[in-house]
Image (cartoon, rainbow, N blue to C red):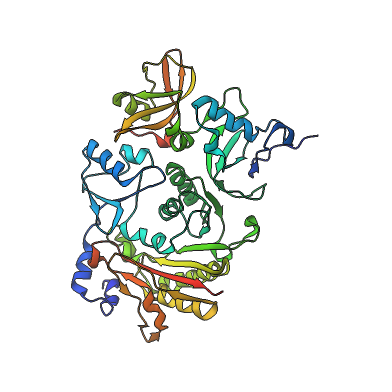
């Protein structure tokens, strides 16, 4: 049985949901505004005969034609574009970091969201990109370098015990918590995510997610912002993790705007009930915008 | 007795020679001076950055500041290879800061630009300085740096790192 069938009671149109999950995903690039503008990238694509179309809800994204390979073009070489799925741009938009702030991306590699955060900060302020895997860190470094990011500090720590020792013990203004997950929402580009699915894995990784989110809330200043995101549908890895956070830390879910179609987080799942504020989180299903699946919530730390 | 460079951590560069405690370590003034002399960039461009050494002669540029020394995996971007006779800018730094350069920029024809990107030696028309140049090309209505070329004896040797070379 398809593990994704367990979500048939959550989605409005299960048939459309399953059909979308079986379609391949178009290749999308994000314009890196540290080095280029959407207009200049568009002109470079036109000059090179690259097939592309703008993405309606975000003026820095282009969907590429089926035969285009984003890594093999001048805009990629110049660091003007980064291959990044549409839904994966959501958490940095929700976090909304400002130039000059102190920002942590606690599970940063390979760096699509980190480089997006740097661009939204105008490459000003202090951005920490952390990961615990050396190989993935080297990908983060090289992606950040290609994008021309100069405000990034790369660290290698377990995000569940992230230490502020290198940062004068000063907490962050904003933290992005884009945790490792069961990746169900990436099934359109990676069918393995569903083939190797097990409830044990979902429950195991949920424990890690609770640890990472908890520590992230602790290293955020009072009144600061934390964004929690996954590329999975399982409420065990989404609302249940947030429920654990609001019960154990001084924080609350807050609303945020997004021009991509989404539905509210759930307040009930498999006999569990969650706080009503879960409705402020956003679930993004593949059949609503022809994208991957995603989950994103914005939290504010108590004063 | 002066301290030695520790390759496992980042140390902020001394502002000037008088502030230097590690022998042979380039100063902030020298590093900025090299870039502004070589490429005609304005010193103000680098005013708000801090500069660091990790590994002998490997200079990094960082948009913020941190306590020195810093035991982190990466700090900003690699900027310059110093502590040798001829200082050499990095591909990343040339791509990031080279657009504002006013001299020592060789603009390649498209065929040469592609060969350069592939790591090949080319022989573009050039009657300027020898040494490290910014290799650039025209794209989307402007001149864009590709990487670092070493110009010697009438030819331009591409310094594109292996991992950044492409063929298309």
Q: Can residue A241 be seen by looking at this rendering?
A: no
Q: How many marks?
A: 0
Quadrant including the C terminus of chain A: bottom right
Q: Where does residue B54 sit, x and y in percent of width and height?
A: 62, 40
Q: Where does residue A196 sit, x and y in percent of width and height?
A: 35, 65
Q: Where does residue A117 sit, x and y in percent of width and height?
A: 44, 55
Q: Can residue A144 be seen by looking at this rendering?
A: yes
Q: Reply above or below: A56 against B46.
A: below
Judge left or right: residue B69 versus residue B146.
right
Judge left or right: residue B147 versus residue B21.
left
Q: Reply above or below: A76 against A9.
A: above
Quadrant including the N terminus of chain A: bottom left
| Residue toward you, B106 or A238 | B106
Q: Where does residue B123 sit, x and y in percent of width and height?
A: 37, 17
Q: Reply above or below: A188 against B167.
A: below
| Residue toward you, B75 or A96 | A96
Q: Reply above or below: B111 against A275.
A: above
Residue occupying the point 54% across, 77% down: A250
| Residue toward you, A15 or B105 | B105
Residue occupying the point 23% across, 41% down: A50
Q: Quadrant of residue A271?
A: bottom left
């Amino acid at each position: 049985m398809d593990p994704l069938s367990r979500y048939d009671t959550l989605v409005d149109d299960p048939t459309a949901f399953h059909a979308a999950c079986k379609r391949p995903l178009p290749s999308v690039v994000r314009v890196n505004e540290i080095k280029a503008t959407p207009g200049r990238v568009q002109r470079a694509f036109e000059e090179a005969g690259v097939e592309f179309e703008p993405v309606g809800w975000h003026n820095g994204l282009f969907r590429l034609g089926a035969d285009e390979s984003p890594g093999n073009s001048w805009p990629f070489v110049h660091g003007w574009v980064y291959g990044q799925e549409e839904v994966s741009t959501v958490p940095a938009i929700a976090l909304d970091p400002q130039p000059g702030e102190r920002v942590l991306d606690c599970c940063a590699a390979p760096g699509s969201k980190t480089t997006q955060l740097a661009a939204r900060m105008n490459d000003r302020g202090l951005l920490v990109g952390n990961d615990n895997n050396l190989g993935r860190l080297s990908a983060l470094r090289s992606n950040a370098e290609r994008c021309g990011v100069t405000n990034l500090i790369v660290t290698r720590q377990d995000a569940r015990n992230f230490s502020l020792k290198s940062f004068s013990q000063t907490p962050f203004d904003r933290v992005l918590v884009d945790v490792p997950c069961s990746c169900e929402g990436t099934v359109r580009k990676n069918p393995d995510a569903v083939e190797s699915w097990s409830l044990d894995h979902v429950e195991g990784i949920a424990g890690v997610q609770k640890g990472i989110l908890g520590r992230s809330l602790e290293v955020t200043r009072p009144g600061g912002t934390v964004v929690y995101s996954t590329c999975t549908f399982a409420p065990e890895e989404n609302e249940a993790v947030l429920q654990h956070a609001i019960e154990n830390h001084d924080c609350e879910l807050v609303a945020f705007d997004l021009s991509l179609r989404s539905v509210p987080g759930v307040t009930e799942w498999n006999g569990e009930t969650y706080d009503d504020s879960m409705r402020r989180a956003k679930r993004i299903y593949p059949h609503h915008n022809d994208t991957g699946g995603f989950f994103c919530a914005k939290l504010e730390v108590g004063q | 007795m002066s301290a030695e460079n520790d390759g496992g951590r980042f140390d902020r560069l001394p502002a000037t020679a008088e502030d230097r405690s590690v022998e042979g370590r380039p100063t902030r003034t020298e590093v900025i001076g090299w870039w502004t002399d070589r490429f005609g960039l304005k010193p103000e461009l680098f005013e708000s950055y801090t500069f660091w050494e990790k590994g002998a002669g490997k200079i990094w540029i960082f948009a913020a500041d941190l306590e020195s020394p810093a035991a982190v995996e990466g700090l900003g971007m690699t900027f310059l290879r110093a502590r040798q006779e001829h200082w050499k800018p990095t591909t990343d730094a040339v791509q990031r800061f080279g657009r504002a350069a006013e001299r020592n920029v060789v603009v390649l024809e498209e065929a040469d630009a592609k060969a350069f990107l592939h790591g090949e030696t080319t022989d573009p028309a050039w009657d300027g300085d020898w040494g490290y140049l910014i290799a650039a090309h025209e794209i989307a209505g402007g001149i864009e740096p590709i990487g670092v070329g070493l110009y010697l004896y009438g030819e331009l040797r591409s310094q594109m790192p292996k991992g950044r070379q492409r063929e298309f």
